[in-house]
Image (spheres, rainbow, N blue to C red):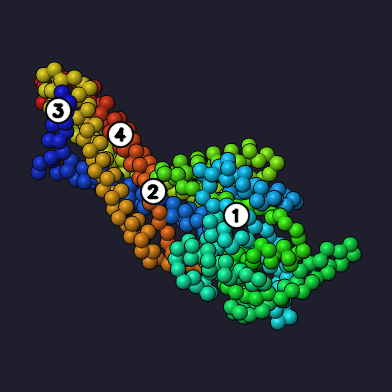
């Protein structure tokens, strides 16, 4: 019986010249679902590209997980050894840093600067700041080469500044810069201590807050400048990527490790990098969901043309339906004929739309040639394809097509066999 339903559905789709109206409606249904699926998929690829690109840019500067204790210093080595012992299988890299505020003085002009002391031998394991250094460039592109480059730039009293700071003060690699460091005092005034540093490198992150307000130095230099003893402000951790290709499983993995760290380190604050930018993260996620919902409605409208098509088809094939029923074919099998017609149109329209969106997404991902204005965090239109997005779009479109097909297919139950055979 299944073969009969499939055979008849296949034959009905092979429309003849006399069925020009049906033929046109089938083409309209196919094109509507094709365009709707293509638009939905391509939009999701681009919005997902925006989300991932901005996440990577933010996470590249701020490690995946941050551990700190507000107002207190951390015993870096002890905590590091404990974390590696308990979570060694999940940890990709771990490092420590401290951040202090000071003034820089150049050409009788002063501005506040955030000086971040890092461990240059470990920093490349948790952030990508070494890859953002534009002057001087690293001689290699491997993680080891970037680590060696960063280590060489942050020796003695050398610092790395942002390119916006360098432009503002006309600084070049090798220039000397005067640091004004606040001194603790009980008096009602601020005491500043002068210290010279050498600009050993210039970085460009692409984020205004970093390129204009941040500088990097060795953690030892920072402690020496502020006359501090051992101890750091925060510990940075990067996790190993799960083997799964689905991003939601990666997020679940990160959340699981976060919960375990919080339970093992109850006296410390353990946060994800996303907690630093909650508004940005939520807005990007909301944008993706809203675009999915709006374009899914367009696909729904395209699927609704299937209702008109099948009502026309059922009306035209009333005599065939009555004959099949009189020969003993069950109503369920007759309904499956029209369900198969609708699902085949939906399947091929969805598949073609997804294929074209994947082809364009691949080109945008490999060759980002569409330039964006400066108001965005990134320079080129991003695209990021993920298997789960294709699966979700395919399933949603097929479900919409199924319901749009199922509604008119129920009409076959209301056909009066005797009346149709007597009159037609």
Q: Is residue 297 visible?
A: no
Q: Is residue 166 above or below residue 74?
A: below
Label 1, label 3: how far apart the Cα atoms are: 64 Å
In the displayed image of the protein, which residue is found farthest to the bottom?
Answer: 107
Q: Which quarter of the rendered picture does the C terminus lie within?
A: top left
Please tell me the numbered disc located at residue 3: 3
Q: Which residue is mark 1?
A: 95
Q: Which residue is mark 2?
A: 386
Q: Is residue 367 above or below residue 41?
A: below
Whether pointer 1 and pointer 4 mark residues with C-beta atoms closer than 8 Å, the reply is no
Q: Is residue 201 above or below residue 65?
A: below
Label 1, label 4: how far apart the Cα atoms are: 53 Å
Q: Is residue 87 visible?
A: yes
Task: Give residue 294's position: percent from left, percent from top.
Answer: 43, 46
- Mark 1 or mark 3, which has the lower sequence index? 3
Q: Residue at x 47, y 53 (%)?
A: 52
Q: Which numbered mark, 3 or 4, is in the foreground of this view?
A: 3
Q: Residue at x 62, y 48 (%)?
A: 80
Task: Give residue 367's position: percent from left, percent from top.
Answer: 36, 64
Label 4, label 2: how far apart the Cα atoms are: 25 Å
Q: Which quarter of the rendered picture does the N terminus lie within?
A: top left
Q: Which numbered mark, 1 or 4, is in the foreground of this view?
A: 1
- Mark 1 or mark 4, which has the lower sequence index? 1
Q: Residue at x 42, y 61 (%)?
A: 381
- Mark 3 or mark 4, which has the lower sequence index? 3
**23 and 163: which is toward the camera:** 163
Disc 2, SS: loop
């Amino acid at each position: 019986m299944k073969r009969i339903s499939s055979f008849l559905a296949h034959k009905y789709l092979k429309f003849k010249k006399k069925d020009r109206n049906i033929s046109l409606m089938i083409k309209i249904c196919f094109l509507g679902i094709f365009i709707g699926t293509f638009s939905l998929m391509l939009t999701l690829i681009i919005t997902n590209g925006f989300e991932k690109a901005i996440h990577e840019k933010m996470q590249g500067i701020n490690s995946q997980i941050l551990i700190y204790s507000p107002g207190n210093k951390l015993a870096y080595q002890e905590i590091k050894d404990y974390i590696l012992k308990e979570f060694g299988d999940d940890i990709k890299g771990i490092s420590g840093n401290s951040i202090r505020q000071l003034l820089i003085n150049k050409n009788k002009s002063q501005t506040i600067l955030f000086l971040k002391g890092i461990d240059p031998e470990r920093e490349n394991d948790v952030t990508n700041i070494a890859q953002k250094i534009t002057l001087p460039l690293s001689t290699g592109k491997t993680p080891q080469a970037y680590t060696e480059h960063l280590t060489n730039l942050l020796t003695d009293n050398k610092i790395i500044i942002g390119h916006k700071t360098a432009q503002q003060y006309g600084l070049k690699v090798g220039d000397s810069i005067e640091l004004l460091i606040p001194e603790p005092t009980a008096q009602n005034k601020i005491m500043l201590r002068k210290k010279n540093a050498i600009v050993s490198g210039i970085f460009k992150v692409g984020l205004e807050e970093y390129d204009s307000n941040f500088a990097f130095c060795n953690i030892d230099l920072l402690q020496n400048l502020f006359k501090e003893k051992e101890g750091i402000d925060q510990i940075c951790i990067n996790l190993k990527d799960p083997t799964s290709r689905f991003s939601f499983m990666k997020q679940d993995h990160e959340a699981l490790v976060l919960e375990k760290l919080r339970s093992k380190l109850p006296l410390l604050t353990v946060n994800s990098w996303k907690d630093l930018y909650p508004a940005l993260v939520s807005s990007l996620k909301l944008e993706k969901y809203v675009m999915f919902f709006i374009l899914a409605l367009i696909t729904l409208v395209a699927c609704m043309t299937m209702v008109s098509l099948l009502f026309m088809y059922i009306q035209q094939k009333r005599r065939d339906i009555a004959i099949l029923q009189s020969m003993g074919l069950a109503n369920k099998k007759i309904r499956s004929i029209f369900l198969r017609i609708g699902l085949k149109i939906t399947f091929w329209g969805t598949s073609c739309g997804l294929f074209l969106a994947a082809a364009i997404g691949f080109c945008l991902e490999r060759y980002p040639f569409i330039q964006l204005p400066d108001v965005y965090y990134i320079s080129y239109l991003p695209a990021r394809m993920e298997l789960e997005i294709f699966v979700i779009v395919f399933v949603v479109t097929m479900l919409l097509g199924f319901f749009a097909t199922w509604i008119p297919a129920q009409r076959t139950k209301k056909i009066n066999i005797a009346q149709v055979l007597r009159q037609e």
